[in-house]
Image: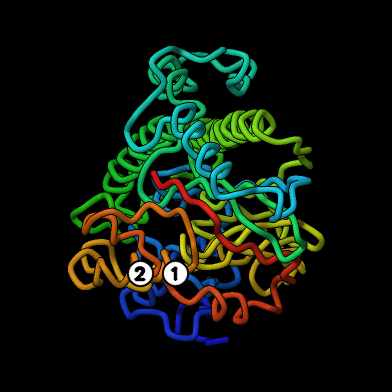
């Protein structure tokens, strides 16, 4: 672990052995916030984000920072173990299943043509008036066409083979446009209010890079926490609907049974108790790893993912990484990685993958950190339970 301790600032504890300078600079800004609590934590997958590093964990006293949750509120992972063994799933059946999944689940910017059942949506906060949930009121009916859709970027659906001998299903997705709209609305609101308050908060010219905050007990802070939690619940409902439909497809093609779904989010803020104090823990590209809590740490579409169990280490605010983390940025990956080489590596493993042309290189395995090193860097935070190797991948 790396420790950075500067006068007048909280200590920064990094489980990442080689964090980029820009991410450390962002962590230093967090460490000087007057309401930041105890320490700043950087997970092994840490890299530069907007305002706060991806893979960062921040605890605050009576303050919430929308940009320290991020744009894809509630984004996270889910995984389901099936009763299928690797020998039960031939290449032909696997290809047919992936084709049916593509028909059932829109990806990228695509939505469902028809609104989905209202009962699939999370319950609107009871007693909330329109003024208390302004973004939800505006975006609710649009979200009815987005629930059960994958989204783009690094979101994915994978069929995997576990070292437990079973076939697994894994999904990475978030809160779609409703999460983005909530994030943008409250980050801009916080930015404007902080200017009026003449706050010492880090306020660059671009609000996207700001650490503008809202007092948690203020009307604005309460509204953000309310709408943010709805987005976390929507993201879970979104993953669950996709998982249900994938299980239906697999069940039609096989005699598989399915075990309870594991779910873990990695972009949210939540009231928790640490070091004897009730604080708001912001996890941006980091997941909860309380003692005995099951989690998911994915690699890339050409490398292993892991089902893990948390150890409840207080030094990380009981957190761990949310994935392998990017080694290089998206544009750099498209510019520098070799398309033929990345495809060759995936083809040699027999993976049904999603690399077709240069624009897909931003999600090639070569753009991510070594998942083995990421896991080994946090064995004081988690215990690996099942190693999962990719068989077939759908990317957003």
Residue at image point 57% right, 78% down: 372
Do tag 2 and tag 1 residues touch (Cβ < 8 Å)? yes
- Visible residue check, residue 150: yes
Q: Which residue is mark 2?
A: 344
Residue at image point 39% right, 51% down: 67
Instruction: Where is residue 96? Give x, y as percent.
Output: 52, 37
Q: Secondary structure at mark 1?
A: helix
- Visible residue check, residue 75: no
Quadrant of the snapshot with the N terminus: bottom right
- Crowding near the residue tagged with mark 2, few <14, some 14–19, many ≥20 C-alpha atoms within 10 Å: few
Instruction: Where is residue 119? Give x, y as percent.
Output: 62, 14
In this image, 357 relative to 242: left or right? left
Picture colour scheme: rainbow
Q: Quadrant of residue 82?
A: top right
Instruction: Where is residue 318? Give x, y as percent.
Output: 69, 65
Q: Which residue is mark 1?
A: 348
Residue at image point 40% right, 71% down: 345
């Amino acid at each position: 672990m790396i420790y950075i301790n500067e006068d007048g600032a909280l200590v920064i504890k990094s489980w990442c052995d080689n964090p980029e300078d820009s991410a450390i600079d962002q962590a230093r800004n967090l460490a000087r916030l007057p309401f930041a609590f105890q320490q700043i934590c950087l997970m092994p997958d840490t890299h530069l984000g907007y305002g706060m590093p991806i893979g960062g964990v921040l605890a605050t006293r009576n303050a919430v920072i929308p940009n320290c949750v991020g744009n894809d509120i509630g984004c996270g992972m889910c995984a389901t173990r099936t009763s299928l063994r690797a020998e039960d799933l031939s290449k032909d059946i696997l290809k047919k299943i992936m084709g049916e999944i593509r028909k059932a689940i829109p990806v990228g910017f695509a939505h469902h043509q028809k609104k989905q059942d209202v009962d699939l949506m999370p319950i609107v906060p009871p007693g909330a008036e329109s003024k208390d949930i302004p973004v939800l009121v505006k975006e609710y009916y649009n979200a009815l066409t987005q629930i059960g859709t994958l989204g783009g970027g690094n979101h994915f659906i994978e069929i995997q083979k576990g070292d437990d001998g079973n076939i697994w299903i894994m999904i990475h997705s978030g809160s779609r446009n409703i999460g983005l709209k909530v994030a943008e609305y409250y980050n801009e609101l916080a930015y404007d209010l902080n200017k009026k308050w003449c706050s010492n908060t880090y306020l660059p010219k671009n609000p996207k890079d700001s650490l503008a905050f809202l007092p948690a007990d203020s009307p604005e802070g309460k509204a953000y926490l309310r709408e943010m939690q709805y987005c976390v619940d929507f993201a879970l409902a979104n993953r669950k609907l996709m998982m249900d439909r994938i299980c239906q497809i697999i069940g039609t093609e096989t005699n598989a049974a399915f075990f309870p779904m594991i779910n873990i989010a990695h972009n949210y803020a939540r009231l928790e108790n640490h070091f004897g104090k009730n604080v708001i823990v912001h996890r941006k590209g980091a997941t909860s790893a309380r003692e005995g809590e099951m989690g998911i740490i994915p690699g890339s579409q050409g490398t292993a993912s892991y089902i893990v169990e948390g150890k409840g280490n207080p030094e990380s605010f009981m957190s761990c990484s949310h994935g392998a983390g990017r080694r290089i940025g998206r544009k750099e990956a498209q510019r520098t990685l070799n398309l033929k080489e990345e495809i060759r590596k995936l083809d040699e493993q027999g993976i049904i993958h999603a690399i077709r042309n240069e624009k897909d290189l931003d999600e090639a395995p070569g753009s991510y950190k070594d998942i083995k090193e990421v896991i080994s860097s946090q064995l004081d935070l988690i215990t690996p339970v099942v190693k999962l190797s990719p068989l077939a991948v759908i990317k957003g």
